[in-house]
């Protein structure tokens, strides 16, 4: 199975500048070029960048499943820089993270807000990290609906059900009580990297990469 199966890098990264660095590798069989994200995928690094939506979620899920098929016993590293987005798209990623055999280590670079912070907290316990100046934010799910008056009640109940489900999962991963999670997600709650450790969203702030001797 080739490692460049997912050479289609995330759309937010592509849109940022249009140019993606290429890496050329030399081997006995000649040269081979990869875009930088495909090359990092070979190292079991996945980028979750930008708005969490269905297309991006499908790419992340596919890469998680691909890396599991390559080596089910080796950790996967999910780098997150996201303002959040769709709950259903985020839950597709979260459920896959819990479903696959490899541990998924999460690392926040920049920001992990809303569904981004939820996925950050959903990494393997003891392997959830952030860089020193990253920021995190948790809040309740937002909803908007247009339609018949009778449907508003249905959708309002669904939003409340989703909120309860997300709060329960966040409480499980952070060690906070449901009451604390419900209170803190009632409005936007921003946290620094060190505050996120105290809260239980992550396990450690990484200042420098530890090089194995």
Image: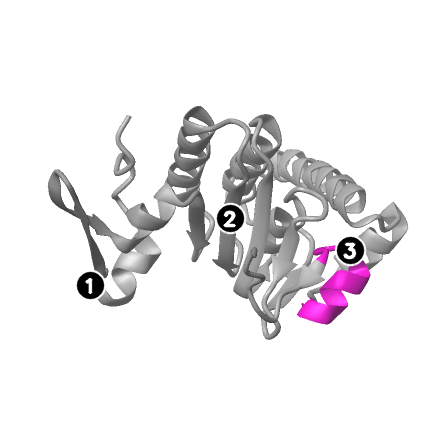
Q: Nearer the viewer, residue 128 or 95?
A: 128
Magenta-colored span: 190-203
Q: Which circle's residue, 3 or 1, is located before the other in the chain?
A: 1
Label number found at residue 19: 1
Q: Is residue 60 left or right of residue 9?
A: right
SS for dot 3: loop
Q: Is residue 116 above or below residue 151?
A: below
Relative depth, front residue between 83 and 106: 106
The residue that mark 3 highlights is 200
- Name the residue tied to disc 2: 78
Q: Is residue 67 magenta?
A: no
The location of residue 149, given as percent across then percent down, is: 60, 39
Q: Is residue 21 left or right of residue 119?
A: left
Q: Residue at x 55, y 49 (%)?
A: 144
> Which residue is at 75% across, 69% downward?
195
* Residue 122, visible in the rendered structure: yes
Disc 1 residue crowd, few under 14, some 14–19, many 20+, Cα 10 Å: few
Lower position in the chain sequence, tag 2 or tag 3: 2
Q: Mark 1–mark 2 contact, CB under 8 Å?
A: no
Q: Quadrant of residue 42?
A: top left
Name the disc covering residue 106, or none. Answer: none
Q: Quadrant of the N terminus?
A: top left
- For the residue pair 40 and 14, the one nearer the viewer reads as 40
Residue 20: horizontal and vertical position, in percent?
23, 60
Find numbered disc 2 in the image and state the secondary structure of the residue it sits on.
strand
- In terms of secondary structure, where does tag 1 sit? loop
- Number of other residues with Cα within 10 Å of mark 3, as a class: few under 14, some 14 to 19, many 20 or more: some
Visible in this render: residue 192?
no
Residue situated furthest bottom in the rendering: 133
Q: Residue 88's x, y, as percent?
A: 54, 38
Residue visible at 72% across and 44% down in the picture: 125
């Amino acid at each position: 199975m080739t490692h460049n199966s997912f050479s289609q890098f995330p759309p937010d990264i592509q849109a940022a500048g249009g140019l993606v660095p290429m890496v050329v590798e030399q081997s006995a069989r000649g040269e081979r070029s990869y875009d930088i994200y495909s090359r990092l995928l070979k190292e079991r690094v996945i980028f979750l960048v930008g708005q969490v939506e269905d297309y991006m979620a499908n790419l992340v899920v596919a890469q998680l499943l691909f890396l599991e098929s390559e080596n089910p016993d080796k950790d996967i590293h999910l780098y997150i820089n996201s303002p959040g987005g769709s709950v259903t798209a985020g839950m597709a990623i979260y459920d896959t993270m819990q479903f696959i055999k490899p541990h998924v280590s999460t690392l926040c670079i920049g920001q992990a807000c809303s569904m981004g912070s939820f996925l950050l907290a959903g990494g393997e316990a003891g392997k959830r990290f952030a860089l020193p100046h990253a920021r995190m934010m948790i809040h309740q799910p937002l909803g908007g609906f247009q339609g018949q008056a009778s449907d508003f009640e249905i959708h309002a109940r669904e939003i409340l059900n989703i909120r309860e489900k997300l709060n329960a999962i966040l409480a499980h991963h952070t060690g906070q009580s449901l009451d604390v999670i419900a209170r803190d997600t009632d409005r936007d709650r921003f946290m620094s990297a060190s505050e996120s450790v105290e809260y239980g969203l992550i396990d450690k702030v990484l200042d420098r990469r530890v090089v194995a001797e």
